[in-house]
């Protein structure tokens, strides 16, 4: 076990009222966050005003160098 470059992923901390843009994938485009709980995020399209509720799907990634990997729990 040595030091490695490791990517860390955390669920993105959505907040009500945020205006977001998703760069790619099936949900690509502009959205407004209109609901959030531990498992779901509800978004509204600002053009069609259609609303969708999905399992939380956006993650924030960070890369760190010199990290002990694998980590013991």
Image (cartoon, grey):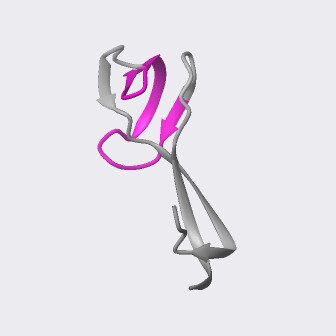
- Magenta-drawn stretch contains 24: yes
Instruction: Tell me if 64 is positioned left or right of 49 in this view.
Output: right
Instruction: Tell me if 40 is positioned left or right of 17 in this view.
Output: left
Residue furthest out toward the front: 73
Q: Write down the quadrant of residue 56 in the picture.
A: top left
For the point 51% across and 36% down, the residue is 21
- Magenta-drawn stretch contains 34: yes
Residue furthest out toward the right: 66
Q: Position of residue 5 (x, y in %)?
A: 61, 76
Residue furthest out toward the bottom: 2
For the point 34% across and 48% down, the residue is 25
Q: Position of residue 65 (x, y in %)?
A: 69, 74
For the point 40% across and 49% down, the residue is 24
- Is residue 25 or residue 55 the one in the foreground? 55
Q: Write down the quadrant of residue 52 in the picture.
A: top left
Considering the image in quadrants, where does the N terminus appear? bottom right
Q: Write down the quadrant of residue 69 in the picture.
A: bottom right
Q: Position of residue 16 (x, y in %)?
A: 54, 17
- In the image, residue 48 above or below residue 40: above
Q: Specify the segment rendered in magenta.
A: 20-46
- Is residue 47 or residue 51 the one in the foreground? 51
């Amino acid at each position: 076990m040595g030091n490695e470059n490791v990517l860390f992923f955390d669920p993105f901390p959505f907040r009500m009222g945020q205006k977001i843009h998703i760069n790619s994938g099936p949900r690509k485009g502009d959205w407004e966050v209109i609901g959030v709980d531990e498992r779901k995020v509800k978004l509204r399209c600002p053009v069609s005003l259609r609303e969708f509720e999905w399992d939380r799907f956006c993650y924030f990634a960070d890369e760190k160098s010199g990290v002990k990997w694998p980590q013991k729990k």
